[in-house]
Amino acid sequence: LNIIFFLFLYNFNYSFSQGIGKERWSIKTLNDSLSNEIDTNFIKISIDSLYNFGKPNDLKNSTKRLDIEKKSFLIRAKIIEYIKQDDYDYHLIVSDINDQTKTIIIEIIMPKYGNKKYYAKLKKVRDELSNRIRNRTLKGKIFDIGGVAFFDFLHNQKGKAPNGLELHPVLIFKIV
């Protein structure tokens, strides 16, 4: 019982000190010093193929943008679920259209938090998502989704890829 209480306190403390959704914040909002090196020529890829990228060793809040995080990918995916996070991002779980057991997380951020260079794209994506939620035309639909690669810490996120790779933020979001 003591060990369970200790683990609870540790996890609570870690979450509280990090701030929900704030890990590697400047990288996932494209506001870090290396964001000018991001290639927005989208590489078409399947979710299954994204699983093949190796999980980074020793990922920390202080880890600078990794080489893979300078690339943008375009996937065709089915929307499984969405959750509005405490940091106002929309956390979407999407599946590979050929194998729905393979899922990843994509994140649609508040445009005002993103790099000003990408504001118009971030706003267009956010507006499209908001319209789809309002009209109930999101879940179960297939979308082309383009975003910047981002490695998140592996914690208990529902729908996460085994290597922690996400598309965060999303810059293209259109129904097929």
Image (cartoon, helix red, strand yellow):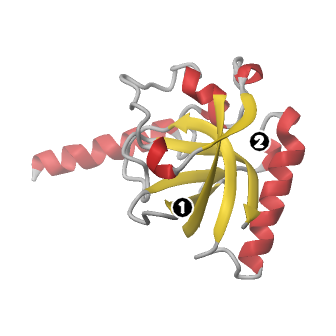
> Real-space Cα distance between discs 1 and 2?
23 Å
Q: What amino acid is found at the position of numbered circle 1 in the picture? A: Val
Residue 130 seen in render? yes
Judge whether 141 appears above or below 22 on screen: below
Determine the residue positioned at 10% across, 53% down.
1
Q: Position of residue 101 (x, y in %)?
A: 38, 63
Determine the residue positioned at 86% across, 42% down.
119
- Could you say which quadrant of the image residue 55 lies in? top left
Q: What amino acid is found at the position of numbered circle 2 in the picture? A: Tyr
Mark 1, other Cα within 10 Å: few <14 / some 14–19 / many ≥20: many
CB within 8 Å, label 1 to label 2:
no
Q: Position of residue 86 (x, y in %)?
A: 60, 55
Q: Which corner quadrant holds the C terminus?
A: bottom right
Q: Earlier in the sequence, mark 1 or mark 2?
A: 1
Q: Please state which of residues 39 and 56 is positioned toward the viewer in this rendering.
A: 39
Residue hosting label 1? 94
Which residue is outermost to the right? 120
Determine the residue positioned at 83% across, 62% down.
127
The answer to whether 72 appears left or right of 131 in the picture is left
Query: Which numbered dot is residue 113?
Result: 2
Q: Position of residue 148 (x, y in %)?
A: 65, 38
The answer to whether 67 appears left or right of 89 in the picture is left
Determine the residue positioned at 76% across, 62% down.
174
Mark 2, other Cα within 10 Å: few <14 / some 14–19 / many ≥20: some
| Circle nearer the viewer, 1 or 2 | 1
Give the secondary structure at mark 2. helix
- Could you say which quadrant of the image residue 84 lies in? bottom right
Q: Position of residue 83 (x, y in %)?
A: 57, 65
Judge whether 118 appears above or below 158 on screen: above
Give the secondary structure at mark 1. strand
